Structures are given as structure tokens and as C-alpha cells.
Image (cartoon, helix red, strand yellow):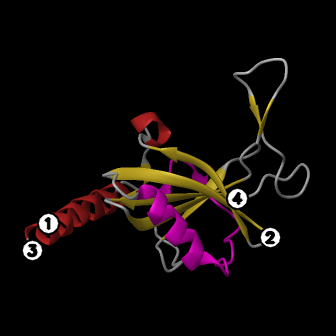
Amino acid sequence: MALCQDRADVACRPCIGRPGVPPHDLKVFCFHGKAHLINVIQDRFGEVRSNSFDVNWNLLPFVFNKKRGTEIPDRPDNLHELLRIAEKLAHGFEYVSVGLYNVDGRIYFGEMTFTTANGNGRFNPHSGDVMVGRLWQQSEAALSISEKV
């Protein structure tokens, strides 16, 4: 990443992936430093769609804040490394969505978001909200137990 000469407050990054085709945006939802859910956003600058997966790349019956994707992406060969990176970045946070890109087997950092969709995102159907809320509570309970030992 290089700073532009004209304005010191603008950061420029090289384009990754194929020209004109944005790579899938992988949002790894982590609770208490542990990855639990991967939201894959497709066609970021077109008709945005997404699919949600568990950490074993099983398709979940809900989507977050988007229409269900028409393309079900293949499980990344480097999924274990992707999750390891997300968990390392998430260490010490109660909740964070770690945004990563996986282009040609290389993992790129995008962002860390502490209020995903500005706190206004919704799971569709609502059962996804309930499931993720339970994951958060369970990970918090597990942390509390391990702190007492």
C-alpha cells in the first residue's frame, strides 16, 4: 500500500484478482477469538449476493444482509490458513468480522469490523440471527469456564 502524493489521507492499494471482476469478500465472524461463520459476498459492485458457511464450509440455511448467492463457491484449499489468520487477528476481541480475500491461493487482508453492517444487518431467515446469537453466548460461556480453571 502506498500513500498518494497529492493527499496524505488517501490510501491506494493495487487491484487484486481479475480486472473488472471483484474477488469474493470473505467475512469471518469471530466470537472471543474463535471463527464460527464465514459470509461470502459475491459481486460486490454489481448485484451483491452472499452465502453463509460454517468453518467446515458447510452451506448454512441463512444469509446475512443480502440475497442468497447463485454461485456456491468451492471450499478454498487454504481454508485452514484463512481461519487461522482470522482467529489470530480476532484474538482479544469479543466480536469481530475479519474481512479477507483469497485470490489464486493468496490471502489478503481487507478489514476488521466490530459493528458489521453498522449494527443494522439482518439474517434471513431470522433463525440465522438466533443461531449466531447462541454461538456468541456459547463462546462467551466457554471463555468464562476456561478463565475459572
Indicate whether 21 appears above or below 33: above
Q: Give the mark, 1 or 2, whose residue is nearer the N terminus.
A: 2
Residue where numbered disc 3 is placed: 149
Specify the farthest residue to the right. 19
Q: CA distance from mark 4 to mark 3?
A: 41 Å
Please, what is the three-letter code of the amino acid marked with disc 1?
Glu
Residue 40, picture quadrant = bottom right
Q: CA distance from mark 3 to mark 1?
A: 6 Å
| Residue 82 picture location, percent across and down | 58, 70
Please report the bounds of the magenta region as a residue range. Answer: 62-90
Q: Are marks 3 and 1 in contact (CB under 8 Å)?
A: yes
Q: Are marks 1 and 2 in contact (CB under 8 Å)?
A: no
Q: Label 3: few (<14), some or many (≥20) within 10 Å?
A: few
* Residue 62 seen in the figure: no
Indicate whether 21 appears above or below 88: above
Q: CA distance from mark 1 to mark 2?
A: 40 Å
Residue where numbered disc 2 is placed: 104
